[in-house]
Image (tube, rainbow, N blue to C red):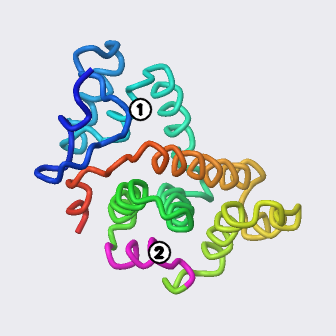
Amino acid sequence: MTDVEHISRKGSGVPVSWFPIPDEAELPEDLQGLFSKAREKIGFVPNVFRAYSFRPDRLRAWFSHYRQLHEETENLDGAEREMIAVVVSMKNGCLYCLVAHGAALREALGDPILADRITLDHRRAGLDERRTAILDFAAKITEKPLECSAEDLAHLKSFGLTEEEVWDVVEIASMYNFTNRMSLACGMIPNEEYHALAR
């Protein structure tokens, strides 16, 4: 294992995670491949991969789930899936996911101003009724889960989402509540590179 200070923000002394970070060369071959693909695609390895690699099997399972949830469907596109991620993360105050998925949303929308507005306050971002309803429900799942009802699901279906897509809204919001809590409880810090992406 490397010292947690070894992979930190340059000069800040802030570790990527409060848990030990394995050396990449010690990881299973498939996870080394995941790190390599990340470098090819975005130019760096997301710190969440490094932090989660403390438990390689959990990283593998988490990333597989993440990829499934971000697969676009006819009525729920990639940008809308990222919108759910940032709305949940804002409600939870999750620095890592706000920075990482804020960058992903800027890229998905091709509109950094709209993306930042959604990230900070989706209700003041000028979204249409359909997207507002999706994000309001994601916020409700996060803040008031005991108040969720079958009527919430029917409301989303009234905007053309299929039952499977409504399930996806629920699952994406729920997964980011999990991921936010993992990030906050492990002290994960986002890569500095995210801040400049898609500006």
Secondary structure of the residue carrying tag 1 is: helix
Give the residue type that dot 1 points to.
Tyr
Q: Amino acid at mark 2?
A: Ile
Q: Nearer the viewer, mark 1 or mark 2?
A: 1
Would you say 108 lies left or right of 72 here? left
Front-most of 159 and 145? 145
Task: From the top left corner, tell me how far across and down residue 185 is, in percent.
Answer: 49, 46
**Viewer-proximal residue, 73 or 50?**
50
Q: In the displayed orientation, state which residue is furthest to the right.
A: 150
Quarter of the figure that contains the N terminus: top left
Q: Which residues are magenta?
A: 112-123
Is 89 included in the stretch rendered in magenta? no
Q: Position of residue 181 (x, y in %)?
A: 54, 49
Question: For residue 122: magenta?
Answer: yes
Kindly identify the residue that appears in the image at 38 percent across and 33 percent down: 19
Residue 134 vs residue 21, the one in the foreground: 21
Q: Residue at x 41, y 32 (%)?
A: 52
Gap in angstroms between the C-alphas marked 1 and 2: 27 Å
User: Up-down: is 191 above or below 30?
Assistant: below
Say which label, 1 or 2, has the lower sequence index: 1
> Could you say where residue 171 lies in the image, as x and y percent from the top left?
67, 48
Q: Main secondary structure of the magenta part?
A: helix
Crowding at dot 1, Cα within 10 Å, few <14 / some 14-19 / many 20+, comes out as: many
Residue at left offset 48%, top offset 55%: 78
Check whether the beta carbons of the residues at disc 1 and disc 2 lie within 8 A of each other.
no
- Residue at label 1? 52
Name the residue carrying label 2: 118
